Image (spheres, rainbow, N blue to C red):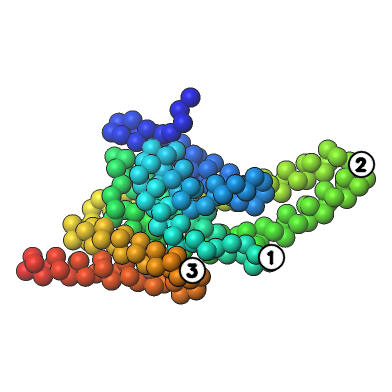
Amino acid sequence: MRWALKRSGANVAPWWEQLCVAGLWGGLLALERRAFLQAMFSRPLVAATGMGFLLGDLQTGLFVGLLLELFHLGGAALGAALPDHDTLAATTASAAAVLMAPDGDASPAMWSLSVLLCGGGGGVGRLLERGLERHTSRLARLAQRSAEEGELRRAMRQNLWGMWSLFSAFAVVTMLGAGLGLLLARPVAALPDPLLNGLALAYPAMLSVSAACAAKGSRARQAGYWAGLGGLLVALWMVARRLSEGT
């Protein structure tokens, strides 16, 4: 049995298989986060590293997950307050980063670009999760009523339908993030070296900002903007430096 897709040279798996693997992992982690187990496999570091392993680039998953884990370190669901869906941000960003590299060797520039493009997916996931709560709550009430009436099989089916809706919704969104990486593979490869170097240096810049946020325990909504701005400024500085050296 293959536990991971091959990502070297001519052994790269078909695009549809890569998308299916990414969607399956994203959907399962969405269930683990809310519906069963809750053993913290859905934390960004584990989720992104697992995605990298399954798609054949463990290193990329690890480094993308490290950045997002630091940024979301203080996130927790307390009562009716839902934090950003850090799992979705991690799975989409790591999948996009891996699939940006057709040869299976994603660069730090691709790590940075994937985080900048998909790191905000946590807000999308929070909205999606909140929207699905109404549907799953209705099914839970129906399941409880069925169980009280002695219809245990019907109650079980209704619970499974609620889990299926959560799985399928997040699987589709994760596949969209992975598909974004596939679409950007050629454009990213054609970027000029100064821009790629700037994006590569943006990764440690964003990592340092995320580490600072984690150390302070900051959960301010502006923290994400500051992290992205720090990475963008470093990238622009490197581009300007390279252009000045060229002239």
Q: Residue furthest right?
A: 149
Mark 3 neighbour class, 10 Å CA radius: few under 14, some 14 to 19, many 20 or more: some
Q: Is residue 167 above or below residue 117?
A: above
Closer to the chain start, of discs 1 and 2, is 1
Where's residue 213, x and y in %?
43, 68
Closer to the chain start, of discs 3 and 1, is 1
Three-letter code, disc 2:
Gly
Q: CA distance from mark 3 to mark 2?
A: 49 Å
Where's residue 246, x and y in %?
8, 65
Three-letter code, disc 1:
Gly
Mark 1 neighbour class, 10 Å CA radius: few under 14, some 14 to 19, many 20 or more: few
Closer to the chain start, of discs 3 and 2, is 2
Residue mark closest to the camera, 1 vs 2: 1
Three-letter code, disc 3:
Gly
Viewed as shown, does residue 221 lie left or right of 66?
right
Q: Is residue 43 above or below residue 127?
A: above
Q: Residue at x 58, y 64 (%)?
A: 83
Q: Residue at x 55, y 63 (%)?
A: 75
The residue indicated by pointer 1 is: 79
Q: Residue furthest left?
A: 247
Residue mark closest to the camera, 3 vs 2: 3
The residue indicated by pointer 3 is: 217
Which quadrant would residue 77 be assigned to in this image?
A: bottom right
Question: Quarter holding the C terminus?
Answer: bottom left
Q: Residue at x 41, y 43 (%)?
A: 52
User: At numbered mark 3, what does the secondary structure look like: helix, strand or loop?
Assistant: loop
One can see residue 178 in this view? no
User: At numbered mark 2, what does the secondary structure look like: helix, strand or loop?
Assistant: loop
Where's residue 7, x and y in %?
34, 36
Q: CA distance from mark 1 to mark 2?
A: 31 Å
Q: Is residue 228 above or below residue 19?
A: below
Which quadrant would residue 104 be assigned to in this image?
A: top left
